[in-house]
Amino acid sequence: MIRGHWGRNVGLAVASLALACNPDAVDPSGDEAGSEAAPCTDAELEGNGWVYARTSYPQLDALWSDGERFLAYGHDGALLSFDGEALELREGFFELDNPELFARAPDDAWLYGSYELGYWDGETLTHTLTADEAEVVITAEGEAYFVGDSSDHAQSVLHWQGSSWVGVSVPVTVTGISSVWAEGEEMWVGGAFGRFAHRVDGEWTIEESGENFAAAMIHVEAGEVLAIGQGALARRSTAGEWSVVPGPSGDLERVPADAPGLTFTTQSGDAAPQLWRWQGGGSEGAEALLDLGTLGLRSSAAAPLVVAGRAEALQLLSTELAMGPTPQNQWIHGVQNADSSPLVQERLHFESTPWRAGSAYAIDATLHYEGPRVWRWDPAALVFVVDGLELDGADPATDRGRWFELFTLPTTGAEAPEIDDLIADGSASAWMLVEPDPSDPDAPLELRRWADGEAGLWQAWQPPVAELRALDLRAWGRTPWLVAEFEREGPNAAVLWRFEPSAGEGEGSWIPTLTVEDDMRPIESMAELNDGLVVATDRAEVWRWSADQGWTVLAEQDELYAPSSDSNLESVYVTSVGSTAKARDIVARVRYSIGFDSYETFTELHRYDPATGQWTPFEPPVSGGDTPFNDATGRAWLLGESQLSGWTLHRHLGEAPADHSWEPVEDVPIALSGLRSIRPTADGLLLHAQRYTATFRWQCSELPP
């Protein structure tokens, strides 16, 4: 048996590719509708070339600003900087979880997260420390001090000396050090239990504030010391007397200010941050300057409002999530006069449409869905442009392609509805299976139809819900299918419906087409052949159906995959590969793992020979890829990875069997390592990667009605 490392998921795929230009829909009864068309020539295939656009940007999580310039860090190791003149986005640095950003300038900053403290010099991000906790304090003189617990140093306070950290000796009686302030040779260090260490002329003294708290920040002004901790404000007068009053609760962050006093923000739970100022002197507490939630900027518990800048000129990073940790829109706003009449202005806007799942009927009828929302790809629209940002190789005046939100399903229950499956079956129509209220586990799935600009319940017919266990909406070829499974045992346990557009007085109707035998449950994947169907089960069995023979077994349970005590077949998926419209190859893709705590994943491709009834394993042209995808031009497509050339896209030439004649596609304009989906359509090919969407429209294709 041939084995090769080819991807991380486990499964079985059976695929059939119709390699003819503009094929008509195939009737599973065996009667072909329409005539076979000649394949597109290579010249026609390459006539229009690639069109691509940047369609997604990394989510930004941390922000620094001095009121005008800024630096932001986010997912996938992205750094966005503005030095007052140029805006620049760099990607691919090491990733940090829950990042915190401390900076003196856009090219002079420290990033902490995932127990790592890195230094950014404007070109490279370099590791400097490993630390369980870390805070970098930038003094008014521009000196940088580390406060935290580092496994690389015995001291809890370190001073940056241009290229490395040097320890500062602090009296051992001050433990749990949490804050520092320094100016010249004078230094204040705050520790646990309200204890402080004060250094003057090289000599340390210990002072007790009289309150059991840890100072998160220290500010010294005109001889008066202000220290703030969780729920407490401590003041040391010029006479050396300490007094403590209650303070705001929540997470504390300092905001530099030209005005006297200590300016900071607090944030509790899901609430928006509040801006505070404490001036000490005769003040009994801190004054709330601004509730940032009143500004109307997007924020949530998963993507809270990030505050940076100076009190007189704040910068706010806000994020609108599509679903989960997926950014749909991100903004950086500037806020002037935060302590009186705040003026909010948009500084920067990012629009993203990350790929989760989708379906394509044609290049300009490709839909993407997530939660209750659906987007449509417009290859003719000018790309979304981030004001002031230049991307390598991009021309915003001519680059085309953009995702537009098509509709959002309305909320009728306790939670917003969620689309489980979506199949585009026309240039302006699609079928959807929808969970109307995900909070209600007993609510049945609904079959909905999007057509003529409306997305409503398909009133003519809903799938039977009595004893229904699972319901899937899928497309094989150009025909939408419903696969239903029922709780009951015995025959007729799974039923296949297909949509017949000419039935139902011209409106179309779902017709029960096939009853599946009980021992074929559950169906994991399925593909249309010109004379019927081919199905794979979760036990790695392959079945074929035709009108004259009914169901026949092509692969027994252990024929393609031989289970052992340390192996695991996790899933089954069906699609197909073939050489002509009249004689399609059937290819099984088997994925499984061997081992438990430390395991390896293997993928095997097998081609079925109908003359001998035997399966023959063969090596794919690339490893690490997915199932071959069919299109409407007589070509099959395969994405994979090779040790020499990395990730590549391969195309089947169409005339030879599926185990021969694959060639690499040159000049693909996007990074294939981040490819999320290949969508062959009736008139071309759409690739959606982590950051880009690319399309290739066939010159020879005419879109079927």
Image: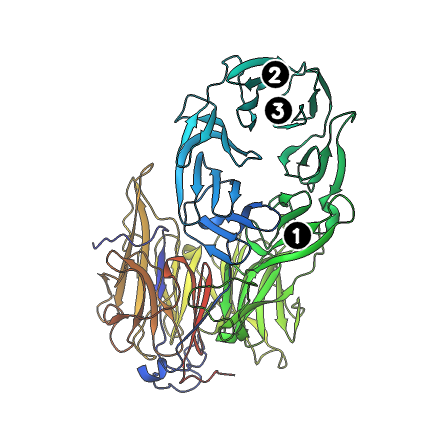
- Whether pointer 3 and pointer 2 mark residues with C-beta atoms closer than 8 Å, the reply is no
Q: In which quarter of the image is residue 37?
A: bottom left
> Which residue is denoted by mark 2 in the rendering?
193
**Horizontal and vertical percent position of residue 640:** 32, 60
Q: Tag 2, which secondary structure?
A: helix
- Whether pointer 3 and pointer 1 mark residues with C-beta atoms closer than 8 Å, the reply is no
Residue 208 drawn above or below residue 307? above
> Which residue is denoted by mark 1 in the rendering?
334
> Which residue is denoted by mark 3 in the rendering?
215
Q: Which amino acid does label 2 sit on?
A: Phe
Separation of residues labelled 3 and 2 (CA atoms): 9 Å
Q: What residue type is labelled 3?
A: Ala
Q: Quadrant of residue 292?
A: top right
Can residue 362 be spotted in the picture?
no
Q: Tag 1, which secondary structure?
A: strand
Give neighbour class at mark 2: few <14, some 14-19, many 20+ (Cα, 10 Å). some
Residue at 52% across, 41% down: 103
Can residue 56 be spotted in the picture?
yes
Residue 187 drawn above or below residue 683? above
Q: Which is nearer the N-term, disc 2 or disc 1?
A: 2
In the image: residue 256, left or right of residue 101: right
Separation of residues labelled 2 and 1 (CA atoms): 38 Å
Residue 441 drawn above or below residue 181? below
Residue at 78% across, 49% down: 341
Q: Tag 3, which secondary structure?
A: strand
Q: Which amino acid does label 1 sit on?
A: Gly
